[in-house]
Amino acid sequence: MNGSKMTTQHKAILAAVKNAPPSGDYVWDGKDEDERPLTHEEMQVGVAAYRKARGRPFSAARKEQVSVRYSPEVLTYFRSTGDGWQTRMDAALRLLVQKHPDWLEKLG
């Protein structure tokens, strides 16, 4: 460590590294429960919880991804409503289908 000052903390870290067990594994001193290494079972529970919590939450109302072409006026209108415009477009179409199930026949 040429050119730098060796602090007490640096010295303590170096001493701990020199006195590490031959296997290189952490040895818990039994004093602080927060420093106790996890058992294999605890690690497996943690990994399972992490994997379960990742990603978008599952919904009972599943949606299907499709590719659709809309007129520029419709897209401009919904995009001008800000973030969540696709959700509002979906809600508007669902409302149309619920209120007017025969609307398609009127278009000819």
Image (spheres, rainbow, N blue to C red):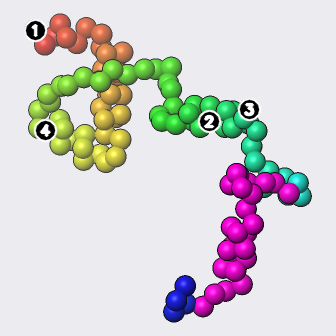
User: In the image, what residue type sits under mark 3?
Assistant: Glu
* CA–CA distance in space, label 3 to label 2: 10 Å
Q: Which mark, residue 47?
A: 2
* CA–CA distance in space, label 1 to label 4: 22 Å
Q: Is residue 34 visible?
A: no
Work out whether 25 lies above or below 44.
below
- Per the image, label 4 sits on a secondary structure element best described as helix
Whether tag 2 and tag 4 are in contact, CB under 8 A, the answer is no
Whether tag 2 and tag 1 are in contact, CB under 8 A, the answer is no
> Which residue has dot 4 on it?
73
Magenta-colored stretch includes residue 27: yes
> 59 or 1, which is in the foreground?
1
> Which residue has dot 1 on it?
108
- Per the image, label 2 sits on a secondary structure element best described as helix
* Residue that appears at 34% across and 34% down: 88
Q: Earlier in the sequence, mark 3 or mark 4?
A: 3
Where, by quadrant of the figure, is residue 32 drawn?
bottom right
> Which residue has dot 3 on it?
41
Work out whether 57 lies above or below 1.
above
User: In the image, what residue type sits under mark 4?
Assistant: Glu
